[in-house]
Structure formats: C-alpha cells, structure tokens
Image (cartoon, rainbow, N blue to C red):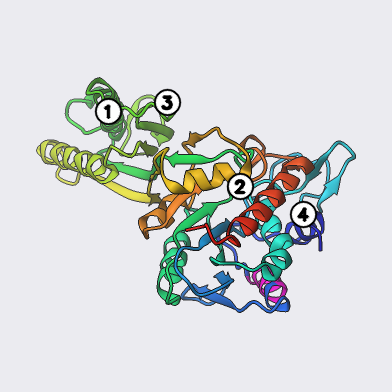
C-alpha cells in the first residue's frame, strides 16, 4: 500500500480521544504483523485501549523511535464540506479528513515505508510507537515510552515524534497543565457584601494572583527566547458564578491554563497558588467558616521538551529531512515524555499544525511525499556502518 492508501484506511477509523481505539489498533497490528514484524501492546487497565510498539532491525543499542498517536479530536459542531472520516481528494493537491494532518499522516508514512525498512540491511533498529488518548492529555505516552525502555534488552537512542511541523525539526515544547478552581462562599443580599463572602470576588482575587505570577516571572527575567512568547503563560479561559446582580454569589469556578518554559517549574507555580488559596481560606473563614477553595486537575500535566540545538537528534533530523531550520511550539505533545525516559527527542512530521483540530482538516500531498522521503532517508542512514 502506498502512503495515500494507508492514510485513507487510518482516517476511516473515527476513534476520538477517550474512546476505545481497538478498531484502528487491530488494523495497524495486523498490517505490521503481515510484514513479519512482531507487535507488542501496552493496554490500559480496562482493556479497551492499547498502545502499540514494535522493532524493525537488529536488537542493538542506538536505534530510532518513530512516535505517533492514533486518536483524533471530535468533528461535532464543525462545518465540514466532506465526510470527515473519508479521506477526500478535491483535486487541489490536498487530502482532507479528520486526522489527515494530526497525526495519521505521519503514521501512514511509517507504515508505507515499513517494507523498505524490512528489506534494508539495518545496522541500527527502527521502532514504531503508536499511542492512544494523546488528544485528551497525552495519557498513554508515559507508559508507552517506559514499555519501549523496559521491553527490549537494547536501548533506543533517539525519538522522533511526528506531530505536524511542515517537516521542520521542533526542539522544544512548553510544559502544559490545566486546572479548575472552585470557590465556595456564602450567599446573601448584595448590600451585605462585607458581612458575607462573595465567591466571585474571591475568584477574581485568585485570578489576579495568577496574572501577577505570570508578570512576576517575566519581570524576573525568566525567559527562553526560543519560544513565542518567550515566557511561561497563565491564562483563564472560563469563569462562571452568580445568579443575579443583587445576590452575593456563593459559588464560582474558573478554568486556567499553565504553559511553562523549561526553566520554570510547573510544580512550584501550582504549589505557590495552592499556598495562596490556603491563606485566603484561613482569612475568610473568620467571616464564613465553610469558605473553601478547591483546585481540581482538568488536564494532566504534560512535561516540557528541552532539546538543545547541538543535540545529535537535531543533526539527524536535519540530515534526513533536508531542513536545516528549527523551531519550538507551545502545544502539548508526547516528546517531553519520551525525553523523560532518556531518549533524545524532537518533533518532526508532515502537515501544518494550523490545519489541526479544525473543519476540513487536510494534509498536502507534497508533505506526505516529504514524510516518506525522510523515513526512507532514515532507513538508508541506519543501514550505514558509520551511523552511531
């Protein structure tokens, strides 16, 4: 099967993040095993989802992991001009379908080049690592990376995560964490604002603390010019509370998004916020004993990626992709999780992130060709005696 045929099959599986992925998983497993490659699964506790990994080539140290995720985001509420789960060629050099860009295009490149990998005289192995539930928090990435580290006697050296990057090496990603904060105050007539505790007023104080924390980090020079913006960000995306203008709100909650550059500690920022929340509780319980602030994890933390420009994996990707540029991103990806297991990691894959998660998502045919070419070049590179 060529890359477009493989991609058409992958797009036909409407597996959303959070749902069982056994349909697309079993097709990929059958495809890989039909080429004589043994596939290994990393299932969840319920047994209705699993990641897949396999090795092509010799069991020696120093190989390369090719990583992608099988799930996609929903299409509900979006205005598609074609069936999102049917890969469609409109004759404009693009292929349309959910996941065509993010990131079944890269998986299709891997599977299309698999026969070439098998026939090559590889001196170092290539690994496939395909996960589930990336789109709802990169949930399977850590276990998949650990499984590759533990299930093989040899140790891979590099990991290439094929998120859409227009085939440009991505050497850094911000760490990401999303929280929900709930404030429980006391209801009452608005004229009693000093005798009651407004959940909305206290929520606003917490929001202002978060904004001030972001500004303080910038003022202290906590910057990394590789990123745009070059500092950690804290953003409040949803605020709810209150029932009427003349009623003191007893309930309020807000959602906030934390994205940290590698030099800032996500854990420290959250811990400082928690400490401030406890201070406010202690103070306001003098007025209303049941005053409470609760912080709930909405999106699990995803670690940052901090690959350096002169790391060997960057040179490798530049060589096989033919792209000497590099960049960084602020979106979540599994690259940091693979890096945490000791693999030199970077992002590089076909398509543009600007097309991801939107109606009429597409990947350019030329991008798929470049993705295939990169993996063919990788195969050739790993077949040389000089590769170390």
Q: Are marks 2 and 1 in contact (CB under 8 Å)?
A: no
Q: For the stretch drawn in magenta, what is the main secondary structure?
A: helix
Q: Is residue 25 left or right of residue 188?
A: right
Q: Earlier in the sequence, mark 3 or mark 4?
A: 4
Q: CA distance from mark 3 to mark 4?
A: 35 Å
- Location of mark 2 (residue): 320
Up the image or down, 342 lies above or below 316; here it is below
The nearer-to-camera label among 2 and 3 is 2
The percent coordinates of residue 120 (x first, y second) are: 67, 67
* Separation of marks 2 and 3 at Cα, in angstroms: 29 Å
Q: Residue 301 placed where, x, y %?
A: 37, 50
Q: Which stretch appears magenta?
A: 22-31
Q: Residue at x 58, y 44 (%)?
A: 319
Q: Marks 2/4: CA distance?
A: 31 Å
Q: Is residue 302 left or right of residue 282?
A: right
Which of the two residues, 206 or 48, is positioned nearer the viewer here? 48
Q: How far across and how far down the image is residue 267, in percent? A: 26, 46
Q: Which residue is mark 1?
A: 222
């Amino acid at each position: 099967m060529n890359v477009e045929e493989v991609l058409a099959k992958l797009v036909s599986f409407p597996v959303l993040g959070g749902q069982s992925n056994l349909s697309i998983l079993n097709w990929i497993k059958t495809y890989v095993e039909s080429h004589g490659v043994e596939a290994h699964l990393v299932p969840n506790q319920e047994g209705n989802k699993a990641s897949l990994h396999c090795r092509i080539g010799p069991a020696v140290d120093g190989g390369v992991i090719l990583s992608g995720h099988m799930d996609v985001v929903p299409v509900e509420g979006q205005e598609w001009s074609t069936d999102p789960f049917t890969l469609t060629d409109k004759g404009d050099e693009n292929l349309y379908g959910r996941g065509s860009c993010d990131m079944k295009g890269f998986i299709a490149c891997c599977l299309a080049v698999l026969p070439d990998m098998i026939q090559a005289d590889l001196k170092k192995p290539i690994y496939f690592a395909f996960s589930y539930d990336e789109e709802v928090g990169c949930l399977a990435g850590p276990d998949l990376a650990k499984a590759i580290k533990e299930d093989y006697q040899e140790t891979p050296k590099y990991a290439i995560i094929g998120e859409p990057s227009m085939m440009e090496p991505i050497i850094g990603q911000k760490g990401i964490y999303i929280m929900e904060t709930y404030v429980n105050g006391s209801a009452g007539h608005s004229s009693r604002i000093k005798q009651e505790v407004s959940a909305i007023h206290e929520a606003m104080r917490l929001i202002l603390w978060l904004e001030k924390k972001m500004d303080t980090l910038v003022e202290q020079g906590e910057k990394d010019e590789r990123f745009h913006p070059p500092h950690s960000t804290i953003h409040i995306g949803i605020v709810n509370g209150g029932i009427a203008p003349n009623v003191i709100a007893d309930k309020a909650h807000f959602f906030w998004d934390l994205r940290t550059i590698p030099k800032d500690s996500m854990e420290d920022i959250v811990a400082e916020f928690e400490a401030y929340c406890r201070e406010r509780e202690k103070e306001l319980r003098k007025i209303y004993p049941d005053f409470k602030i609760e912080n709930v994890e909405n999106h699990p933390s995803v670690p940052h990626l901090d690959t350096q420009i002169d790391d060997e994996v960057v040179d490798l990707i530049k060589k096989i992709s033919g792209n000497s540029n590099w960049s960084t991103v602020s979106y979540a990806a599994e690259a940091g999780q693979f890096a945490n297991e000791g693999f030199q990691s970077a992002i590089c894959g076909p398509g543009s992130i600007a097309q991801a998660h939107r109606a009429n998502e597409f990947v350019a045919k030329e991008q798929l060709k470049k993705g295939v070419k990169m993996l063919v070049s990788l195969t050739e590179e790993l077949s040389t005696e000089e590769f170390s």
